[in-house]
Amino acid sequence: MFTAIPVSAENRNNQNATFQSSSDNIYPLLITSENNGSNVVPFSENDQSLDNNINTLNTIVGCINTWLQLVGIFLTVFTIIIGVLGFIGFKDLRDTKRSLEEYKEKAANDASYINGIKISLEINAKKQSDFLSEKSSILVNQKQSPEIIEKYSEYSNSLRYIELFGVELKSNDYLIRSLDYFYKKKYQEALEAAERSLELDTSNYKAWNNKGNILTKLGKDNLALKDYNKAIKLKKDYASALNNKGVVLSRLKRFDESVETLGSAIEADSELEEAWINRVGPLLKKEEYDQALISINKALEINPKSPEALGNKGLVFDRLGEKDRALSMYDKSIEIDPTIAEVWFNKGITLQSIREHNEALEAYEKALKIDPNYADAWFNKSSAFYSIGKFVEALKAIEKAIKLRSGFDELVHKGKILDLLGKYEDSLRAYEEAIEINPKVADPWILKAIVFQKLGRLSKALEACNKAIEISPKHKEAWLHKGHIFVEQGEKEKALEAYDNVLDLDQSHLPGLLGRGQVLNMLCRYEEALEVYETAIKQDRKFAWSWVGKGDILSSLKRDNEAINCYLQAVELIPDDPIIWSKLSKAYTTLGQYEKAMSSLINSVSFRYQKPQMMIPYFP
């Protein structure tokens, strides 16, 4: 900036004086229009002209002085304005300073208030954390009470506010946040919170146990097992982790280890109802039914109205063959709590076992409504559709199961359905995938042999049977189907040898007896064949194909009346089978009973177009 210095009157007079004094020393030459500068007139000779020039100069000087005065006035006004603005700015500065002091005082009060809230939140969080840590047994399949779930949710929400105030969360905070997500079935978020909990404290055994539960829900049983072991290593008598480990071992079909581990959980906490209940499953797999009943009764002693225990007691009765008592127990469980998917599932199994397939389907639907991701329920729903010949629906259900859990059993079952739908190449692919999962099981090789046989690729079928026998030399169905292939190849003696191998392993094996009887019939060894079929009938009079086989032998022996009686027995057992009606028509024709022959033939044709033909189910 600059400061304008005003010009005073005295200075202005001095300037004029200076200007005038200097003019005294100048001798100007005036040029007139007449002489165009040719005649120069001295100053002293023309006074009037000099006066005019002086006046002109004075006018110019006056203008300059006026301009200088205006500049001075402007500078004065400008200076005043600057002063006024400075005064106003000082006042504003003083007001601003006062506002800052007031704001500082208010901020201090707010900080004190916020600090009070922070302390209150920390105390409340500690209380909730202690309460939840004490209450949480963290069992993998435990149905937690709504009150506890609400507590988890409240605490998890309060953690967000605590974080906003700069409080660092602890391992247990993340554990309870993980549990909140777990009970909301947000398993990925639960896993992230559990891992954060363990980052802060690797010795938090409850966090290891909780992480195992999450991995179990995500279908990662082997990884879950490792985390349960870490929890148990940190706390050997941790009943919850021992219980959960036992559950996973059972899922992995390690039933002996499961029973032992659940026993350890009971030793750690004899009042842990869930451990007694979970022990039932592997005991049933080991066919230790009495022990299973003892275990479930102990659970009911602890809690007589436990819907889970009642449901599992129904399962024990089912395995003991007491189907009505089983269904009664399921209904009692459902009456107490209709939201347990496993009880509906087990009810479906019992109904399916007594051939109530439609009711079983309803039970599976109930289970899936509660838990749409229940892979076993999708599998059994497919099985029920399969049993009533609805193969398209069965395929859709098994594909749902495979999306949730692409396991060995699911792929084998899918292969069977595709086989019956005539999609043989797709069926073979399903069996190949199953073999990749477990190459040491013979069953998919046998099923591959059946498909190859249908495709007429008998050498491939024989290779598949040989592979099955290599894996399991005492596998009856492998030898059985090898016999079937030899029959189709015309190798009767080899077929007979294969069927004899089946019967060496199990003398009462009905499909093996029927195969042997068929080959003896082909070899015209009718009396031996007749003896075989009579043995089969003694074992099971309700197996229609034993009667059919006996009828064929009697027909070959020209004993047509006896043959007709055998076929009629078979028709009573399977009234809509076109093959049996066709054989009956042929027998009536031989005896000249043409009216009965025609009636039987009409039935044969009618039933042939009403239902798809299936192979005799030698291999379930």
Image (cartoon, grey):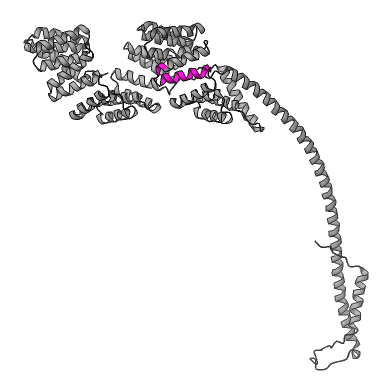
Residue 252 in magenta? Answer: yes
Examine the rendering and report whether any part of residue 467 can be seen: yes
Q: Is residue 359 left or right of residue 89?
A: left
At a point 89% along the width and 89% down the height, the residue shown is 43
Splitting the image into 4 quarters, where does residue 104 fall?
Answer: top right
Position in image of residue 226 (x %, y %):
47, 26
Position in image of residue 432 (x %, y %):
29, 30
Splitting the image into 4 quarters, where does residue 42 fall?
Answer: bottom right
Image quadrant holding the N terminus, namely bottom right
Residue 247 in magenta? Answer: yes
At a point 66% along the width and 23% down the height, the residue shown is 124
Splitting the image into 4 quarters, where does residue 599 fall?
Answer: top left
Examine the rendering and report whether any part of residue 421 can be seen: no
Give the magenta part as a residue range: 236-256
Q: Nearer the viewer, residue 545 or 259?
A: 259
47 over 215 or under it: above or below:
below
Q: Is residue 557 left or right of residue 509?
A: left
Q: Nearer the viewer, residue 538 or 588?
A: 538
Magenta region, main secondary structure: helix
Q: Nearer the viewer, residue 194 or 420?
A: 194
326 over 421 or under it: above or below:
above
Position in image of residue 166 (x %, y %):
66, 33
Q: Nearer the viewer, residue 407 or 44?
A: 407
377 over 437 or under it: above or below:
above
At a point 90% along the width and 91% down the height, the residue shown is 45
Position in image of residue 213 (x %, y %):
49, 23
Image quadrant holding the C terminus, namely top left
Number of callouts: 0
Q: Is residue 49 left or right of residue 530?
A: right
